[in-house]
Image (cartoon, helix red, strand yellow):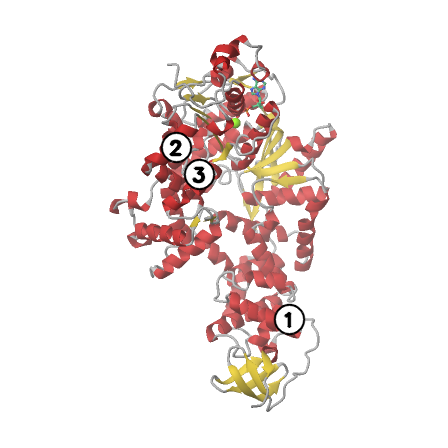
Amino acid sequence: MSAGPTPQADPKADPQADPRATAPARREAVYLAGLNPPQRQAVEALDGPVLVLSGAGTGKTRVLTTRLVHLLATKRAWPSQILAVTFTNKAAREMRERVAAMLGRPTEGWWLGTFHALAARMLRRHAEMVGLTPSFTILDTDDQIRLVKQLLESESLDAKRWPARLVLSVIERWKDRGLAPSDLGPDDAGDIAGGRMIQLYLAYQERLRSLNACDFGDLLLHTLKLLQREPEVLAGYHKQFHYLLVDEYQDTNVAQYLWLRLLAQGHHNICCVGDDDQSIYGWRGAEVGNILRFDQDFPGAKIIRMEQNYRSTQHILGAASGLIAHNRGRLGKTLFTDKDGGERVLVRTLWDGEEEARWVADEAEALQGKGISLQAMAVLVRAGFQMRAFEERFIHLGLPYRVVGGPRFYERQEIRDALAYLRVIAQPADDLAFERIVNTPRRGIGNATIQLLARAGRAAGIPLTEAALRLVATDELKPKTRTSLRRLMEDFDRWRAMVEQMPHPELAGVVLDESGYTAMWQADKGPEAQGRLDNLKELVAAMEEFETLGGFLEHVSLVMENDAAVGDDKLTLMTLHAAKGLEFGHVFLPGWEEGLFPHQRAMDENGIAGLEEERRLAYVGLTRARDRAYVSSAANRLVHGQWQSALPSRFVGELPDAHTDHDSDPGLAAAAAVAEPAYAPAFRASYAAVSRRGPARTIEGAAWEVASRPRPQSAFSVGDRVFHQKFGYGEVRGVDDDKLVIDFEHAGQKRVMDSFVQPAGRG
Ligand code: ATP
Ligand code: MG
């Protein structure tokens, strides 16, 4: 390797203090002391491109952090001359903290963060060059979806056939690959949206620009285009950044890779660390090829391999290595550890998901009894819906826990929506719940209508549901809105009548189906939709344990309140994807069942490649553990009120015997699925037949009554002259409770709410 470019950087640097000359002579820096030879080499090889390609727990992140310290300590660079990219905000924070601790000073203003955070910072500097102002907003997924829906509408595309999420995911994949609309040719269009994807992409980008907004993909795409098209901007960054540091390089997508490559052209000092066996974001556009091609992309690159794992025991490492050896597409690595022995990976099959949760919680408590803190334990799940059973169990035991990287089960959007329907059924006066779902799924009941309802409700001191009942009997609403609000009220009326007639989990299923809520997510082709549908099924299954709907809802509100009282020592509950780069003493890996893990969808959509990505995920999971890993599977799962028997994951069979202890109830593996749940599908069919006959009663005959103030007599009487905001002046012709029939001067005869009119002087 040549000496590499001299940093012209530091005007204040004392030439006498050239670190390359003096550092070796100094007393060895403390931060270098504990490193093994290849780690040290990776820290000290400051010039030119370096790739550290090595297995889990070999100290890649530690090397990167130490390298950053080394650059500063040897005065190779000022903080502002180093760009360090980590994968998550949490990782960035940790790196800052570690560096700050080593250096004893804060790290404010450093270029140290996620790709998104760094790109956003760059983009704010040059926003005008891409047609934005520096105060641009960053849209969230909901905003993006709404925007795409509008576009589909204005292009007269059928949103049922081409769901907004599908269209959006095509756009996002293009962005992941660094492709702006102008980079695409007719051949790229495909047949989604009738072959009009490129126009849609273009229109989407124009719309974002007119809103002075970006989505997450844009942060990177815009800066990438800037670096590609504006030589001066690029030259500026070349001048600024002397050293680039990148963690988790195996999960970079094409756009990120191109971005890094351009920035590295200035000084060629780029150090990437990663592990091809831990590439788990292929489904989001990550290209493991980036790491495998490093020496071609960065000529003269030094490739450093580290084989000593400092994290895990031999058994954990042996189990993980045996598992990942089943993947064909990999470089292959050896790993060893000095942490001998330890305990074998405990493999356990349990009866069902509830029992699995009970077992995990018991083990966690037993560990706690041995003096191990909860902070050192994690439960890593494959799919979000698995969390529910664990949360319930932890809450039941009072075991403090935190959910990382996502909301807790009952706080998820789809769960809150579903609960809101149930709450309105159980408690018609629950305005918050009603407001949440009155237009979800969309029924054309917009904000203006909701405000009208709120006004009517406030004026009469009645809940929104009752205000809705009264308003649909007037002309205050547009006919279409009135019809759909009336239908919704009729639905609630019918559902309420069913509370006494059917088991509440069954009722929940009916409500979710009849309200169109399930269909809304079924039509959604986005990456999260299936997970949401699974969560809804899990919610229905969870209701089984309670005798009544009220009992269940009460339980949920208690669960939601639980968080406040606990201290800092908490067990971590998170997805495997979010656990990358982290480590815990004891790691529980539940749900190792065929179809769940490996996930069926990954295999259906991507075949062998999908399966191998799942296996890498299992490898990531196992290698998070320092002291012991616990793998479990349930023999039965309650899915949508149906018991299904599950087979243990093939990954369980791939764990070498020498490193596992199978500690299962011997009768269990052979056990067949248990009997059908109490209510049979036939019930549902017969209900459907009844309900098809049409609503038995109309709103007027509503069987329920909302507890509210007695209706006041109207303050108006026949002959009064009044003013109504929408219809103008008129004269009262009839009074019916709180409703008035008015002849308006311009609008003709209307029925209105008396709270919406004011007395007007005669004249
Ligand atoms: P992953 O692939 O999971 O991201 P990694 O390769 O980034 O892992 P680190 O997280 O940097 O590994 O290190 C794993 C653990 O080993 C950490 O607790 C770290 O402090 C420790 N470690 C790394 N190198 C050494 C060393 N030379 N001496 C002692 N402990 C070390
Ligand atoms: Mg790491």
Task: Estimate the spatial distance between the alpha carbons at disc 2 and disc 1, rounded to whole Å.
Answer: 59 Å
Beta carbon at label 1 within 8 Å of ligand 2: no
Please state if 715 lies on the left or on the right of 658 as rendered. Answer: right
Q: Residues within 10 Å of mark 3 (few under 14, many from 20)?
A: some
Question: Toward which corner of the image does residue 176 lie, by quadrant?
Answer: top left
Which residue has dot 2 on it? 236
Q: Nearer the viewer, mark 2 or mark 1?
A: 2
Q: Which mark is residue 458?
A: 1
Q: Looking at mark 2, is its residue's CB closer than 8 Å to ligand 2?
A: no
- 75, above or below 746, in the image: above
In the rendered view, tell whether residue 650 sits above or below residue 70: below
Residue 18 horizontal/vertical position (percent): 48, 14
State the CA–CA distance, disc 2 to disc 3: 11 Å
Left or right of residue 56: residue 200: left
Q: Which residue is mark 3?
A: 122
Q: Give the CA separation, mark 1 to mark 3.
A: 49 Å
Q: Secondary structure at mark 2?
A: helix
Q: Residue furthest left?
A: 186
